[in-house]
């Protein structure tokens, strides 16, 4: 499984829970990027720009796809064409975690570890709007994470009504 979705959609939490319930390893791509680069995410954005970050992100995604487990991605992975193509064409199940922009924004504003969330709210919303179409096109399943973790898990593991 590959989890995609905007910042604050709950990808890391859901990935951890899926990993426990399915006894699978979880690969957190942002952690892999920090390990590969030896830098924090804000340091990469400050020193190498978003393009540098996307390039690391593509590399760790390619590597992650070679091993079993659940892949938790960063929210902007689908903006980089090469990463988007990998996700769109993978045989793994791709799950798009989504919620209303306002609740996502509540979860991510004032978070210094997310460089793109510290822009003015209108710009963060524009980012969300610009990404929605790609999340939807890449995903096999869209799950609303507005409620609770249990509902999200049910929607993923037992998607029939
Ligand atoms: C980003 C989302 C972040 C992280 C980086 C860029 C984005 O991951 O990869 O700050 O472009 O939306 P989360 O979605 O886990 O916050």
Image (cartoon, rainbow, N blue to C red):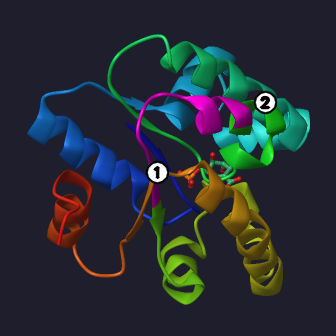
Q: Nearer the viewer, mark 1 or mark 2?
A: 1
Pick whichever, 11 or 91, lies toward us: 91
Q: Find out whether residue 95 is within the magenta segment.
A: yes
**Numbered label attached to residue 140:** 1
Q: Position of residue 118 (x, y in %)?
A: 73, 69
Going 47% across and 28% down the picture, which residue do you hit?
A: 91
Q: Position of residue 81 (x, y in %)?
A: 82, 38
Of the 4 image quadrants, the one containing the N terminus is: top left
Going 70% across and 47% down the picture, which residue do you hit?
A: 78
Q: Find out whether residue 43 is within the magenta segment.
A: no
Please tell me whether mark 2 sits on a helix, a strand or a loop: helix
Magenta-highlighted residues: 85-96
Please tell me whether mark 1 sits on a helix, a strand or a loop: loop
**Numbered label attached to residue 54:** none
Residue 141 quadrant: bottom left
Going 85% across and 31% down the picture, which residue do you hit?
A: 52
Q: Which is nearer the N-term, disc 1 or disc 2?
A: 2
**Numbered label attached to residue 82:** 2
């Amino acid at each position: 499984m590959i989890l995609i979705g905007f910042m604050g959609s709950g990808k890391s939490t859901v990935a951890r829970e899926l990993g426990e319930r399915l006894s699978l390893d979880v690969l957190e791509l942002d952690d892999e990027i920090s390990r590969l680069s030896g830098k924090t995410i804000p340091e990469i954005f400050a020193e190498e720009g978003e393009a540098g970050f996307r390039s690391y992100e593509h590399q760790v995604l390619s590597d992650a796809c070679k091993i079993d487990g659940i892949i938790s991605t960063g929210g902007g992975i689908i903006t980089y064409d090469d990463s988007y193509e990998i996700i769109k064409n993978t045989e793994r199940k791709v799950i798009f975690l989504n919620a209303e922009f306002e609740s996502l924004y509540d979860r991510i504003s004032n978070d210094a570890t997310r460089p793109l969330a510290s822009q003015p709210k209108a710009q963060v919303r524009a980012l969300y709007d610009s990404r929605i179409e790609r999340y939807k096109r890449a995903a096999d399943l869209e799950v609303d994470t507005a409620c609770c973790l249990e509902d999200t898990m049910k929607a993923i593991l037992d998607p029939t009504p």
